[in-house]
Image (cartoon, rainbow, N blue to C red):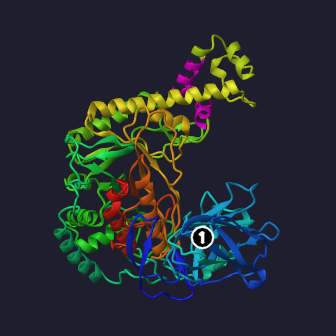
Amino acid sequence: MISKHKSLQHDSLRCNWLNDFTVLFRVACTSSALFLTLGYAEIPEDNRPTDPIAVAGAAHLDNKSESGATLVLKDESGEAVITFDLRDEPLDLSNYIHLSVRIDNQSNASVDLFVTGKGNPQSPWPGRLRGRFWLRPGEEDAVLNVLMTRPDLPNHHPLVQTFGNLYGMPGGHHRHWEYVADDQFIRVLVELHWQGAQPSQQLHISHPFGTGAYTADAAMLDDLNFPVVDRFGQLRWQEWEGKITSKDDFQRDAEADLERAEAITDFGPQRSRFGGYAGADPLESTGFFRVEQIDGQWWFVDPDGYLFWSIGANSVADASSTQVTGREILFPDDLRGQVNFHRKNLIHKYGESDWESKLIDVTVGRMMEWGLNTVGAWSKAEMFETERVPFTIQLHPFTTWIAPLSGMVDPFDPRFRESLEQRLADLAHTHAENPWLVGIFIHNELPWKNGIALGEAIINSPERLFARKAALAYLSNKYTSITDLNSAWDTDFKNFKTIQTPNEPTSAYESDITSIMEQFATEYFRISRDLMRTYFPNHLYLGCRFHTRNPIITRVASRYLDVISVNVYEYDLSGFQLEVDVSRPLLISEFHFGIPDFGHWGRGLRMAADARNQADLMRLYFHESLRHPDIVGAHWFAWADQPITGRSDGENFGIGLVSIVDRPHRLLVQSLRDVADNAYRIRRGE
């Protein structure tokens, strides 16, 4: 979260989150782990903007100068937004890794901050960068670093040719769909929410500036020390707490972890055997998981009747492989093909013969110790057999190509139903009566797209597409002739088979395409629901793990799903909502905040500045989820860090609860345990 000019000593700090609870944090914050030895850099004083600073909210500005301004807090708790208007002299951060703001918290308040940088509104995407931070009472000289995300490098770029199309590169390049064009900022906003201030206490906030020297110059390759990773998959160029240096370290870890796991037998005080809340009388026991809305709040209810809120992780006990072939320079000489470093390290740790069974034992113990009561999607199948931790299963039946949309289901294609039915029938042999199975996801992040893009893709697809045939049948049934359709759409099609997207869509056209999408979604969710009821009548249909939240689709989905699953990569859930026709519980099926602290170049789909910031952001995200009346759980992605050299799609994020050598990330799992300890009290509003 916060980097300093000098290393901080280990501190015990108390923070109060809006009177929720008081938690003892023991944190160790060191200087931000920058890439290679690029070090700390800052915009020179004479280049800093001197544009106006304005504030709105429960505070006023005092002592404005070229170094920044002092914010005077009016109330014990409140909100304010400080705006740095840089239009006259845009802030050029093209040579920096971070957009940064320095803050001295000279108050007794705990402060939740959002730092947002905005570029030219006419540029691609929304032109903004954002970070979130938690400032402790009295914390001074805190530098809040927001990672500068950038567009993809071209395929012919020497860095891409050497490393592959990684999300994060040495030198600080991090690709993302959201970035500020040309690294030029015209506004920087600092949004503050505080609690616990004394009258007229102050914070000093600097002008925004840059930190960390950025380069994507191919010349940097001449200075790099290859190979990039050691035999355990760790970055060779950097040291950190928890880095392994020999195979003997694995054996010592194994002995300690197995002994620790053996001592963990349950989820802790006031918890049911499933991890539900046993501090109150149970509801009716049905022997399976279900959902209920109680006093305006949605809940899971566990098989024994106890209220259950799902704290989960994705890819439990599993991790991604990385490609060696074509990038041999990055790896030790003895590696070929594809390598799963995490799996190789587990074999070093537990031995070739029974590493998987020992891994499962340790993983179950860790989940119980850390308070994780749900095995999320993408997880190792052996986690479904433990009868100690509730789990979900994800299925991937038949998908097809619809115009520009690859990997999309066509629910009118009989192969979809046949594929899904076969998978459910096979799964039912082992899990139809399993009380530990919460429910089943069907598909993941289907490309529903926003607006009516899916409907247009359907009618523009080849005639053989079953969904197009269904769409044309709908139109021919609605309009008595092609003449009537042409009149409504202001087109001149010869017949229904020649229908395509018109150059100038009319309102009637948009209404018809919306109806085609509704028909499409209805068929998809109805078939899925009906087959779930046939093969898993006692379990929950958890949906398709939405990423795009198209209201046309989510409204239809709400009529058929038991729980609507959504992958939500955001910093803030306070305003999160989903458009539905029928009230349903929501499950956050993926979220994370990635860091560079343990040798990673890639941060994540949402980024944290360092390990302390990551732990804070996880805690805040869970708390906001717990307060949301419709959210019944949130699952962290992922169990293990991704390989530094990237998985097949280039993701190389530091997002794991454990490292690539299977060592827990201390601050993150401490935060997780704290969330689990307080989850039901927060959810119940106590």
**Is residue 457 within the magenta segment?**
yes
Q: Is the residue 466 above or below the residue 544 in the image?
A: above
Q: Which residue is mark 1?
A: 146
Q: Position of residue 499 (x, y in %)?
A: 66, 23
Q: Position of residue 140 (x, y in %)?
A: 56, 83
Q: Is residue 654 visible?
A: no
Name the residue rendered at 43%, 51% in the picture: 588
Q: Is the residue 526 above or below the residue 606 in the image?
A: above
In this view, the residue in front, 539 or 407, is 539
* Number of numbered discs visible in the structure rendering: 1
Q: Is the residue 628 above or below the residue 230 in the image?
A: above
Q: Three-letter amino acid code at disc 1?
A: Val
Q: Magenta residues?
A: 453-475
Left or right for 118, reference 647: right
In this view, the residue in front, 226 or 426, is 426
Name the residue rendered at 54%, 45% in the picture: 548
The image quadrant that residue 418 belongs to is top left
